[in-house]
Amino acid sequence: MGQHPREKARTAGHILISSLSFEAALARVALILGRLGATPNSLTFASLVLALACGAAAATGAFLIAAALLIASGVFDLLDGSLARATNRITAYGALLDSSLDRISDAAPLLGLMIFIAPMGWFAVIPAITLVGAFMISYVRARAESLGGKLPSLWMRRSDRLILLTVALLVGPIHLPGLDVRAPLTILCLAVLGILNLWAFISALLAARACLPRGPHQAP
């Protein structure tokens, strides 16, 4: 049976309160870092450095370290926006820098996994496909908005992809008996992530088709 309307409202209220509490906690941490001299852009670069270190760790098979670095990178990526909002330092260039470096941060762990998996030959195509799918999801949203469209909230957003990639790294040290494959569960998780990325890319294209203006497009 479905939830009673009051129960649904109560659940939604709890989710909203939890979200606001999380945002408030992030803002407090961001302000502490700001008092120590951090700027939104410096936190953005810190997130990038941690993502690059994650890629290096993944390339050597240090999956648990890579997972910890990826989580830390994601936290700093959240903190830069919180600090910008808390200190009223939101700028167009800051948003551009954040989005641009996010693409590198997205690529670094997957490139590291490609290096790790490369000795197994064609298996290295799996993280490559996952990477291409992730880039295409971001590109469709950015391009659609530049053409005057407003896409709805889609699935497989960057936060979703980071969570699934963290899971893929955490299961890396698990070996399956009788299977002569490096990090088999990581490869399986990457294959699932790649399929979801491509599916989300197609969904984003369909959503963009529905929301974009129907008239002729004037090239800039």
Image: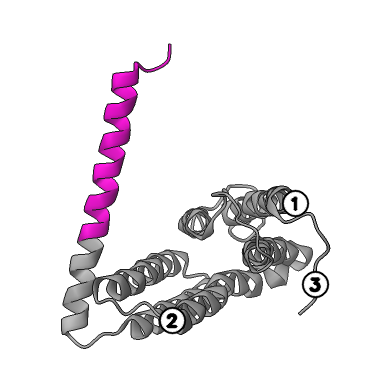
Check disc 2 and give the amino acid type: Gly
Upstream in sequence: badge 3 or badge 1: 1
Q: Which residue is mark 3?
A: 218
Check disc 3 and give the amino acid type: Gln
Q: Nearer the viewer, residue 145 or 138?
A: 145
Upstream in sequence: badge 2 or badge 1: 2
| Magenta residue check for 3 | yes
Relative image position of residue 150 (x, y in whole percent): 60, 56
Q: Is residue 179 left or right of residue 61?
A: right
- State which region is magenta: 1-24
Check disc 1 and give the amino acid type: Arg
Q: Which residue is mark 2?
A: 94
Q: Label 1 crowding class (10 Å Cα cut-off): few <14, some 14-19, many 20+?
A: some
Q: Is residue 121 left or right of residue 106?
A: right
Instruction: Point out the residue furthest to the right here.
Output: 216
Q: Nearer the viewer, residue 14 or 184?
A: 14
Q: Nearer the viewer, residue 197 or 180?
A: 197
Q: Nearer the viewer, mark 2 or mark 1?
A: 1
Q: Label 2 crowding class (10 Å Cα cut-off): few <14, some 14-19, many 20+?
A: some
Name the residue located 62 percent from the left edge and 64 percent from the top edge. 145
Q: Which residue is mark 1?
A: 209
Q: Nearer the viewer, residue 118 or 105?
A: 105
Q: From the image, which quarter does the C terminus lie in?
A: bottom right
Local SS, label 2 = helix
Relative image position of residue 24 (x, y in whole percent): 21, 59
Q: Main secondary structure of the magenta part?
A: helix
Instruction: Point out the residue furthest to the top here.
Output: 1
Q: Is residue 172 left or right of residue 41?
A: right
Upstream in sequence: badge 3 or badge 2: 2
Local SS, label 3 = loop
